[in-house]
Image (cartoon, rainbow, N blue to C red):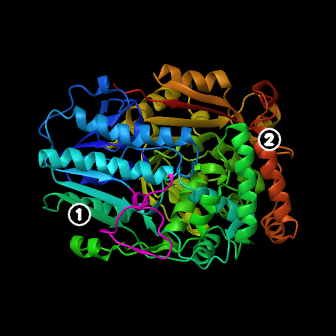
Amino acid sequence: MHILMTGANGFIGLHLLRRLVRDGHTVTCLVRDRGRVPVSAAGGRAWRADLLDPATLAGLPADLDAVFHLAGGGRVSTVTEAGMADLRRLNVETTRNLLAALPQPPRKLLLFSSVSAQGVRDGVVVREDTACEPRSPHEIAKYESEREAETWCAARGVPLAILRPAQVYGPGDVASEIPTMLRLLRLGAFPIFGTGENLMVPLIHVSDVVEMAVRVLNLAFVGTRRFGLTGRQYSVAETASIFAAAVGRRSGWLRVPKRLAHTAAAGFESLSALAGTQPPLSRARIDNMTAQRVYDSSASQRELGFAPARDLADGIRETYAWYQATGTRGLGRQLAEYYPIALAEGEGVGTAYEYLAKWRVIHKFLPSVRRMLIAGLPEKYGCSLDFAALACGLEVELVVVDEREEALLRFRQALQRARLSPQLTLRQVALGQIAALREPPFDLALSCEVVQRLDETARRGFVGDLARVARRIALFAPNAGNRAHATRSHLASLSLDDISSLMTLAGLTLEDAGFVDMPPFPPGLTLSQAKREHVKQARWQGPALAALQLFCRAEGSLPRAAKRPFAHIVYAVGRVDRT
C-alpha cells in the first residue's frame, strides 16, 4: 500500500512507521524538517510540510490507499483559554488543513484520537459506542478533531477508523507523564490523591497499539468505525507499586487526602489566574486522578482478533531502561549502575566515573538509535561495556568490531560477568576495513581509546570509513592536555584540535567536542581485586558514589579551558549529512 502519515516523528508514529515499512508498505511522511533522522532512518519518505500552513501542503500524493493521521499536540492538563486555543490549533485545525489538501479521497482514513474524546466518566463503563461527553479543553479538542474527520469522510464515502488509545507507554515516550511519575517514585515523592484504590486510565504498550492499528488498516469496513485501544486496568496504588519496583523501590509514594489536594489546587488556580499562567495542579485534574475510570474494549479486540499482550511490569522495566539510557526527564544513568560493570571488566570506580562522563556526552543523541557500532575496543582501560549497557537499555542491535581476537574474547567474557545480553554481533575486522562491512547504516558509531593507537594517515582513513557506514560518530581518546594522565597511562594522546579535525576532514558536521572525565582523585589510582570487593561492600559506598555523581554533573558546567589540563578524555561527535 501507499500510505500517507502525519506525526511520524512522534512517539507512536515512529513505532508505527517502522512496522509499516517492515510490512512492505510505501509510507510518505509529512514532516516540518525533512532532515530529521528518525523518519528517514525508519525507511519513510520525508515530505516537507507544515499542517498549520496550507500553502506547504500543495501537491500531496494522490491515489493513496490509506492516510494515518497522528499529528496533534497541546498541553493535556491545561485549563486556560490560551491552552484551549492551542489545542484546537494543533488538533482540529491541522486535521481540517490535511483533509482539505488531499488531491483526492484516500481509500481509508485512520485517525488517532484518544479515550479523552469521550470525557472522564466516573464509575461509568466506557465502551466504543459510549456517547462522548468532553469537558476539559483536551477532551473537547480531541472530540472536535473526530467530528472534522467524520464530516469530511461521510461527504465523500471514505471509510473512517477512529482509534482511541488510552495511556500509551514504551521506549520513545518523552512527552507523557510516565517519566515524571517514575522520577518522583525514584525520589520517594509520588503523590497519590485520595485512597488510590480507584481504577486509573489503562496503560497500553506502544507495540500493542501498533499491532492493533495495523489490524485496523487491513480490516475491510464502510462508514465510520471506532476502536478502543486499552489494556488491563490497575488501581492507582497498584500502578504505583509496579512502577516503584521498576525503579528499584519497595514504595515511593505519598498519600495526600483529596480534600487537602483540592484546597492546594484552588490556591494554585487563584495565583495562576493573577499571574496569567497555567496552574501546576487544578481541581479538575485532581477529580480526574481520583475518578473511577472503567473501560471495556472487548468488542474491538474480538473484531481485530488481538488483545493487548504486553505485561505492564515487564513493559515499564523496559521503558525505564530506555529512559535511563537516554536521560529522559532526569531519569539518567547513575554511577552506582556503572560500578558493577567496571568491576566485571577488572576495573574500578575510576572507570565507572569515566563511563558516566561519556554517557553525559552522548545521551542526547541516543533516542533515535536503532543500530549501534562499537568501532574498535579500548587499548588499555576496560572493554567498552558502557556502550554495551546502553545497547541493552535501548534494546538495539549492537555490532562490535576489532582486529584483535583476544580483545573480542575479553569483551565477551566481561559481558558474561556483567550479565549483559545485548543483541550482539562480534566481528574480527581490521580497523582499516570497516567500510567493507556491507551493513545497513548504523545510527551511531562509538569508538573509545582507539584512534590514538593509529598513525595520522590511518586515523583519517578510519574516521572516513566510519562516515561511510554510520550516520553519527562519537570519538573518545586520551587527552594530550593532561600530561600527568598521559605519563601514567603510557598511551598516545590527542588534542581537541586533533580529534575535531578528524571529523571535519572526513566531511562530518561537528556537533560537539570538548573534555570529560575529571574524577577527584589522582590519575593512575588502582586497587587490588580484594580492595575493590571491600569498597563494593562498604557502608559508605552509596553516599560516596552519590557524591561522585554530583561531581560529574558539576564537571559539565566548567569551561573548556579549566578542563583541558585535568580531563582524562578528549572527545568529538560528528554527524554525517547525506543528500
Q: Position of residue 346 (x, y in %)?
A: 69, 61
Mark 2 highlights which residue? 554
Main SS, magenta region, reads loop
Who comes first in sequence, dot 2 or dot 1?
1
Is 119 contained in the magenta span?
Answer: yes
- The residue sitting at 75% across, 27% down in the picture is 560
Q: CA distance from mark 2 to mark 1?
A: 50 Å
Question: In this orientation, does residue 343 appear?
Answer: no
Bounds of the magenta span?
114-136
Q: Position of residue 441 (x, y in %)?
A: 36, 40
Question: Relative to residue 505, is residue 321 depicted above or below?
Answer: below
Mark 2 element type: helix
Mark 1 element type: helix
Mark 1 highlights which residue? 215
Question: Relative to residue 483, is residue 323 depicted above or below?
Answer: below
Mark 2 and 1 residues: CB-CB less than 8 Å, in contact?
no
